[in-house]
Amino acid sequence: MRLKITKSKNASSLYVIQSTYENKKHSSKIVEKLGTYDELQKKLNGEDPIEWAKKYIEELNKKEKENNREVLIKCFPSKLISKDDQRSFNGGYLFLQHIYHELNLHKVSAAISKKYRFSFDLNAILSRLLYGRILFPSSKLATYKLSSKFVEQTDFELQHVYRALEVISKEMDFIQSSLYSNSLKISKRNTGILYYDCTNYFFEIEQADGLKQYGASKEHRPNPIIQMGLFMDGDGIPLAFSLNSGNTNEQITLKPLEQKILSDFKLSKFVVCTDAGLASENNRRFNNEGERAFITTQSIKKLKKHLKEWALDPSGWHLADHDKPYDIAQLDEEANKDQCFFKERWIKENGLEQKLIVTYSIKYKNYQRQIRHSQIERAQKLLDSNPTKLSKSHQNDYKRFIKKTSCTSDGEIADNELYALNNETIVAEEAYDGFYAVCTNLEGSAQKTIRINQRRWEIEECFRIMKSEFKARPVYLSREDRIKAHFTTCFISLIIYRLLEKKLGNKFTCSEVINGLREMNFYEIKSEGYIPTYTRTDFTDSLHEIFGFRTDYEIIKKAEMKKLFNPTKKIK
């Protein structure tokens, strides 16, 4: 590379150029425009721009020569590797670290550290708890040990991890509100629509205590559980969470957390979307105040008789952008299998006015009947084998299709209990196939309300990621403050993951993202650098393109690897 000065009528411009040879022709290309002579003179505080440019280009040439130097590694088949010498390191966390610093979590850690004046490095501990939760989910002890797998080494002790958990628990609310305000600097948050749902996590213990209480487990486990309520924004990014004892009624958990959002996040205008289990009248009334609104799933079976008859009436249905009424009993099912028909009306009960929207889909009907058919087959197999093993059935359990007769037709006690398929239950359930209802106090189109409600699956996916990918349960911690800190780190990890997913344009599945980062390992060559041992893929190419640095060279010199740490921490 060399210096080229181009003179024009008004200025002299300095360029870094490089000779090229392509298609048997010598040429040159511009590598970098350094600026005009006058511009550089102002920046360099009196230093001669031409002399500065020559020195700069000399450094570029040295760097290029060093990068192009062939690295030779000597290995001996007869020589054992050193004992306890770590040779493999993970670098996938660098992309998580970039988002960690975008969210200013290092500054949040600094603010908390200043408040409590402890000596350990909270930033190092919190960051490793988060990277570990996403990449190598395990116990706090294992996470502490696994933190040595990262290219950047930290210096803290296991006792510091547990002390940090106590502080994280105390600062749950501060961390959540800081995360929200800091996330606004990364991208605009869609807080016009908020989704709320609850789930629970089980403990490998038998004795209930504090937040750990026996309740209705989502996984039907007989262990004590803790309940989590989660708000998610309209783009699938978690917003806030709360923890409640396992025996708490889900319906009463929405209002306290929403009040925190109103006060701590300074939000006032939004639509809250929930499932039927959280759709109490109190919750609807609460979100019928101010500039808030609600959209909630409505059980058709629980509607009053006249509304249920209206909802299931085959006449009076419509398609989007069509005024023509349809009779769904007369539909050509094959021709209309992808259509979604709807009807709507305003209702007023106990002074609360809301719009009832009912949809009908042939595809949804066929799906429900397919599920039921497989459940009926399971029920029949149980009847054919040993029906005496029949235990109490749940609402969606296949055993609900089995009826037991303990009396004769005369009302006398039978000698033997009789088991058979409950055809009445099957027929009664089929009447609701294909139908789905929501209630809202919004005055907009039914189509818009339906579209908003259809995205509730994303909050369910948030819970699935925490349980399956992050292995948030079972919980092995016993102290309440440490339990709260555990779920706080799971919550932050979920935000970081979702923001990464968004940066990647939602082009990759959850397992592709996490496994891809987990496999981005490097083999260390002492005194030389790091050799990537992962496979370069579309995923790794996307990461490097989006984050603006690369880790996929044949070897990364030690000095260059240290320079890679900077882009992940210096956020503009």
Image (cartoon, rainbow, N blue to C red):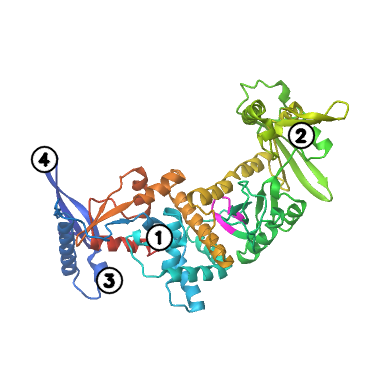
Q: Is residue 102 visible?
A: no
439 on left or right of 83: right
Q: Is residue 108 above or below residue 220?
A: below
Considering the numbered disc 3 on the image, is that residue within a helix, a strand or a loop? helix
For disc 1, the neighbor class at 10 Å (few under 14, some 14 to 19, many from 20) is: many
Tell me which numbered mark, 3 or 1, is placed earlier along the sequence. 3
**Label drawn at residue 311:** 2
Asked if 140 appears above or below 374 in the picture, the reply is below
Give the residue at mark 4: 24
Q: Is residue 318 above or below residue 345?
A: above
Q: Main secondary structure of the magenta part?
A: strand
- The part of the chain drawn in magenta is 227-240
User: Which residue carries the number 3 mark?
Assistant: 43
Q: Which residue is mark 1?
A: 97
Residue type highlighted by circle 4: Lys
Q: Residue at x 66, y 49 (%)?
A: 273
Identify the element where label 4 is drawn.
loop
Circles 2 and 4, Cβ within 8 Å, touching? The answer is no
